[in-house]
C-alpha cells in the first residue's frame, strides 16, 4: 500500500500524530463511560438482567465482528475518509443512545458507536507503519498512552458529569464531542482524497499481494496473545474491585485500587512500545510481563489485603502486554497492507477469546464462592499467552509466511 499524496502526511507528521492521538482518546471512552453508569442505564431503560449482561459483552463482540471488515473497507476508502466516517459513526451512535428511551435502539446505536471504534482499532497500527515506519515504538507508545488516558478519564468523569446535569444521558452523550474533535485533523484530506491507497498502488504499477494471516502460524500466535492478554484485562476490570471488597476493603477503596491499575498503565503504555522497538528479540520482555502477572495473581489469591498496592502495581506491569502486542503488530509486517491484515485478524480473533474472560471468571466465582478457581483460570490463560508470546518474540514478517 503506497501512501496517498492527499493524506494527512501532506500537512506534516505532526498533524498526523495529533490526529492519531485524538482518535486514540476515543477508543474506549464509549465503553468505560457506560460501565461507570450501567446501573443508572439499566434502571432508566428497564433493562433485564440478560439485556444488561449483553450490553457489557457487546464491545468485544463488535470489535471482533466489525473489526474483521476493516481490510475490506481499507481497499475501498482512503485512510482519511475511513477515519472520518469511523469517528462520525462513534459520535452519532453516542448521541442517539443517550437520547433514546428504547432498550433495542440503545443496543443498535451502541453497536453503531462501537463500529467506529472497531475500525479505528484496526487502523492505528497501519497508520504507524504508513507514516512513522522508523518510529514504531515511540508513536505506538504515544497513542497507547492516549488510549489509556481516555479510558481512565471517561471512567472517572462519567458519573460526575451525569450528576452535574442530573441525568445519566449526559454522562454518556458528552463523549460524542470528543469524537467530533477527532474528525477535524482528517477532514481536509478526506474531502480532497480520490480513490483509495489500493487503487493508487495499482495505477502506479505496484502489485498488491493478498495477505491471509489466518493461514499462518504467526497470525494465529498474534491472535492468541492479543486474546489472552485482553481476556485477563477485561476480567481484571470487571472483577478486581469485587475481589478487594471480599478481602475486606471498603467499596470506595476497592474502586480506587482498580482505578490505580488503569492510572499506572499510562506511563507503562508509553514506555513499553519504545522498549519493544529497540529490542531485536522480545522473549525477555514477554517473560518479564508474565512474571509480573504471575506474582500479582498469586498475591491476590494468598494475601489480597496485606500487600494490595504491590499486587496492583504488578498487575499494571503485566497489563503492559497490551501496548506490547500493538507494537508487535507493526514490527511483524513489512508493509501497510500486511499491518492492516495482521491487525484485523489478531484483534478480531483475539476479542472473541477476550469475551470469555469476565464470563468464565464470574461463573467460577459464583460456583465456588471464592477466588482460587478464577485466579487459577487466569494463570492458565497467562500460560497460553506466554506460549504464543514465544512465537511472536523473534523477528519475522507476515508477508514471508503467505
Image (cartoon, rainbow, N blue to C red):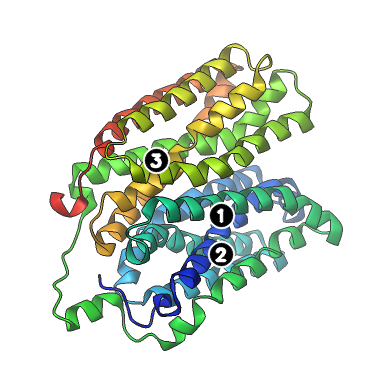
Q: Tally the numbered discs.
A: 3
Residue 173 rendering spot, x and y as whole percentages: 70, 64
**Mark 1 and mark 2 residues within 8 Å of each other at the beta carbon:** yes
Task: Kindly report the distance in space between the C-alpha atoms of the residues bearing marks 2 and 3.
Answer: 25 Å
Name the residue carrying label 3. Answer: 227
Local secondary structure at mark 2:
helix
Of the residues under marks 1 and 3, which one precedes in the sequence?
Answer: 1
- Residue 254: x, y in percent? 72, 29
In terms of depth relative to the viewer, which is nearer, 55 or 152?
A: 152
At 49% from the left and 64% from the top, the residue drawn is: 20
Q: Is residue 347 left or right of residue 180?
A: left
Q: CA distance from mark 1 to mark 2?
A: 8 Å
- Per the image, label 3 sits on a secondary structure element best described as helix
Q: Residue at x 27, y 36 (%)?
A: 281
Place residue 45 in its image quadrant: bottom right
Residue identified by numbered label 1: 146
Secondary structure of the residue carrying numbered label 1: helix
Whether residue 223 is situated above or below residue 114 in the rendered picture: above
For the residues carrying marks 1 and 3, which lies nearer the camera in this image?
A: 1
In the rendering, at what x and y percent does residue 238 appear? Answer: 60, 36
Give left or right: position of 184 versus 190: right
Residue 377, visible in the rendered structure: no
To which quarter of the image does residue 179 belong? bottom right
Within-10-Å neighbours for mark 1: few <14, some 14–19, many 20+: many
Question: Which residue: 49% across, 84% down?
Answer: 188
Is 316 placed above or below 31 here? Answer: above
- The reply to whether callout 2 and callout 3 are in contact (CB within 8 Å) is no
Amino acid at each position: 500500500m503506497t501512501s496517498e499524496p492527499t493524506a494527512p502526511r501532506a500537512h506534516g507528521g505532526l498533524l498526523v500524530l495529533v490526529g492519531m492521538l485524538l482518535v486514540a482518546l476515543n477508543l474506549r471512552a464509549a465503553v468505560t463511560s457506560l460501565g461507570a453508569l450501567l446501573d443508572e442505564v439499566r434502571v432508566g431503560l428497564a433493562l433485564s438482567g440478560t439485556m444488561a449482561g449483553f450490553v457489557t459483552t457487546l464491545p468485544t463482540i463488535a470489535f471482533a465482528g466489525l473489526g474483521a471488515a476493516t481490510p475490506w473497507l481499507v481497499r475501498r476508502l482512503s485512510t482519511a475518509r475511513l477515519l472520518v466516517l469511523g469517528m462520525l459513526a462513534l459520535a452519532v451512535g453516542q448521541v442517539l443512545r443517550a437520547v433514546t428511551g428504547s432498550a433495542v435502539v440503545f443496543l443498535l446505536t451502541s453497536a453503531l458507536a462501537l463500529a467506529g471504534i472497531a475500525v479505528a482499532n484496526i487502523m492505528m497500527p497501519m497508520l504507524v507503519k504508513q507514516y512513522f515506519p522508523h518510529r514504531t515504538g515511540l508513536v505506538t507508545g504515544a497513542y497507547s498512552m492516549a488510549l489509556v488516558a481516555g479510558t481512565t478519564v471517561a471512567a472517572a468523569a462519567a458519573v460526575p458529569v451525569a450528576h452535574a446535569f442530573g441525568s445519566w444521558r449526559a454522562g454518556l452523550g458528552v463523549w460524542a464531542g470528543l469524537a467530533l474533535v477527532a474528525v477535524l485533523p482528517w477532514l481536509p484530506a478526506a474531502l480532497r482524497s480520490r480513490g483509495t491507497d489500493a487503487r493508487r498502488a495499482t495505477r502506479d504499477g505496484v502489485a498488491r499481494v493478498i495477505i491471509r494471516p489466518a493461514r499462518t502460524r504467526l497470525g494465529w500466535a498474534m491472535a492468541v496473545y492479543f486474546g489472552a492478554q485482553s481476556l485477563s484485562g477485561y476480567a481484571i476490570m470487571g472483577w478486581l474491585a469485587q475481589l478487594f471488597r471480599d478481602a475486606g476493603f471498603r467499596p470506595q477503596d476497592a474502586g480506587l485500587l482498580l482505578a490505580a491499575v488503569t492510572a499506572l498503565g499510562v506511563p507503562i503504555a508509553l514506555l513499553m512500545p519504545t522498549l519493544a522497538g529497540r529490542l531485536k528479540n522480545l522473549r525477555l520482555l514477554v517473560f518479564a510481563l508474565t512474571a509480573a502477572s504471575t506474582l500479582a495473581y498469586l498475591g491476590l489469591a494468598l494475601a489480597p489485603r496485606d500487600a494490595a498496592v504491590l499486587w496492583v502495581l504488578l498487575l499494571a506491569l503485566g497489563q503492559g502486554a497490551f501496548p506490547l502486542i500493538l507494537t508487535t503488530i507493526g514490527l511483524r509486517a513489512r508493509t501497510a497492507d500486511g499491518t492492516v491484515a495482521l491487525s484485523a485478524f489478531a484483534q478480531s480473533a483475539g476479542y472473541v477469546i477476550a469475551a470469555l474472560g469476565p464470563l468464565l471468571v464470574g461463573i467460577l466465582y459464583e460456583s465456588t464462592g471464592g477466588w482460587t478457581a478464577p485466579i487459577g483460570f487466569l494463570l492458565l490463560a497467562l500460560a497460553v499467552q506466554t506460549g504464543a508470546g514465544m512465537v511472536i518474540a523473534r523477528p519475522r514478517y507476515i508477508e514471508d509466511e503467505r
